[in-house]
Amino acid sequence: MTKPISYADAGVSIDKANLAVAKIREHARSTFNEKTLTEIGSFGGMFSGVFPGMAEPILVASADGVGTKLKVAFETGIHNTVGADLVNHCVNDILVQGARPLFFLDYFATGKLDPEVTASVVEGFARACRENGCVLLGGETAEMPSMYADGEYDLAGFIVGVVDKAKVIDGKSIKPGDVVLGLPSTGLQTNGYSLARKLFFEVGGYTVDSYIDELGTTVGEALLATHSSFLPQIEPLLGTQASSLQSGQDARVPLIKGLAHITGGGFLENIPRILPEGVSVEINRGSWPEPPIFGLMQKIGNVSDHEMFRTFNMGIGMVIICGEADAEILAGQLKDRFVIGQVSNQNQERVVIA
Amino acid sequence: MTKPISYADAGVSIDKANLAVAKIREHARSTFNEKTLTEIGSFGGMFSGVFPGMAEPILVASADGVGTKLKVAFETGIHNTVGADLVNHCVNDILVQGARPLFFLDYFATGKLDPEVTASVVEGFARACRENGCVLLGGETAEMPSMYADGEYDLAGFIVGVVDKAKVIDGKSIKPGDVVLGLPSTGLQTNGYSLARKLFFEVGGYTVDSYIDELGTTVGEALLATHSSFLPQIEPLLGTQASSLQSGQDARVPLIKGLAHITGGGFLENIPRILPEGVSVEINRGSWPEPPIFGLMQKIGNVSDHEMFRTFNMGIGMVIICGEADAEILAGQLKDRFVIGQVSNQNQERVVIA
């Protein structure tokens, strides 16, 4: 008779998963609000779909990952920030359409479940959810032997927010003469890490522990700088109308005409996502301080300017476009911001870096 | 001067990603309906949050993965069914609370992007979304060199559905004497694959191409059997009230008192998720035909009955609990179903297999 084989023999421990789930529940509960109608552990998470004061609520949803920034977490053993990266990334992605976050769900997949690491990752999710007023409504923790290398995991995040139809930000009113503002990023945010890791670790010969004077920190810490949520800065301005001088006949032009989150595809591919036909954007390089990490990477790999701007955020995490007459008002209401360019008639390139 | 390094040198091709996104858009568009307010490619997907006819809409959200069933897809080269597995899994997970699906978002992560494989996976997402009346609203395609083995990928799915508060199914009215019905699964659905693969491939020495008479097909095809959506069978019954004879004083008892989707944790761990305090469920083994794949796996590994029922669905994909007086009516409205047990006073075990 064969020795009886169990699920645990196949590398999957339901008991360990249940232990991890208990820790996850505790973190998730810390994010719950009065609109949360369910407990973690039920098949689906329940959230009120009643939006008082909204004439025509629109749900805005987005899915994202952390990319190979995770590799830096594995190498440094710091697991409590990548969850915040993912939440903030998702929050910013729906913020650009004018939406405030409602709830977030995570997917955590690993080869062999380590309840401590899982709890650390989820702590990051929960902390960032609380900071954004977003409920951690549920998620999936998957143990997949032989799919992931030892000590590695992948994360995906999913967010749903809401915006009243009249307050959707869609870039449609952007026109030549409008002003381009930029909010500073804390670092690479959550994209370009495969190139960054190649440059630092393969070409440059650094490790995560190498201290670099120019960065004032180790490579690992510089690369793990948490992706900011731009919600606190931008939320007070959502739904605000442009000044009447600017909007002329159309009183419904919003103060913020367009928002672009600088994610995968960098500066060059994200700004065009919000531009209507017939316009381009001219960016004045030098109008904001580029954090030294970008220049350092460029030098290490002799990377072209074009490739840098197509891959990285170059120090600007969120781009805001507003009417010329509103630029001063808007800039006055944002603590950290730079006037980085202007909207022009359409050129061959949708984004010109000058 | 170093040879200039580009993002593509680091193993990430934005161009290839854009090609994949174009194919994804085409599939996604085939799922759009009048409530879809946006195009794939915008930062967030927009969906109407107005639910006419609902007094108090509740959003129900769930996240899930496909687990190591993906390994069978890699080994057989069949990539257009795992997407449907994931959509149907998610649809069933929110159906158990009475919700109909609104929209789905996917996360697709791989080491080196193969646009053909990506398109095939997304075709499965889109087909199943159409079949469930669910919009494929967005997703994330991530190329993560060195995170996944060649030719491998991971998938996560996120679903949001809606149910009117008065029609939520929560199991609260379940009481001793109630009847347990089961809807047949097509196979393993989407859980227990790490054990199944160990049993067939390591212990049993089979390959995905081995033809097994008892299964009437190859191991690969048997293991890839698509996870069913139980929405078409159950949707017509959602919101239906129990017969007055059954409900007595409380006219608000629903016809379907509880639904349990048999996923990770199998029979033994999923049914208790919907049971109120004070009751257990007695399952009469033999009251439904167990598909031969379960007996075969049990024999190969000398797996205990307990472990089988804690890991696999054993041929029942969805469990339905209703009042005794309603069992005949309900059974009459379901095409394929078995009466598999009854609710009893609480025993030491929440689920007793007799």
Image: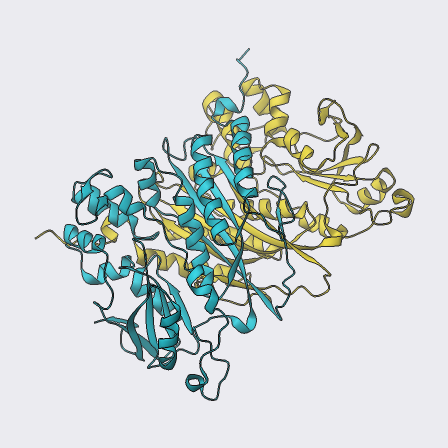
Chain colours: A yellow, B cyan
Task: Please tell me in which quadrant of the rendered image residue B295 appears.
Answer: bottom left
Task: Name the side, left or right, on which B317 lies relative to A274.
Answer: left
Q: Is residue B47 visible?
A: yes
Residue in the foreground of this view, choosing between A103 and B138:
B138
Residue at 57%, 51% in the rendered image: A159
Quadrant of the drawing holding the C terminus of chain B: bottom left
Residue at 50%, 26% in the rendered image: A200
Residue at 65%, 31% in the rendered image: A267
Residue at 29%, 65% in the rendered image: B268
Residue in the foreground of this view, choosing between A168 and B80:
B80
Q: Position of residue B245 (x, y in %)?
A: 42, 86
Q: Position of residue B166 (x, y in %)?
A: 55, 74
Residue in the foreground of this view, choosing between B131 and A210:
B131
Q: Position of residue B253 (x, y in %)?
A: 47, 79
Task: Name the side, left or right, on which A58 lies relative to B29.
Answer: right
Task: Please tell me in which quadrant of the rendered image residue B265 appears.
Answer: bottom left
Q: Position of residue A304 (x, y in %)?
A: 61, 19
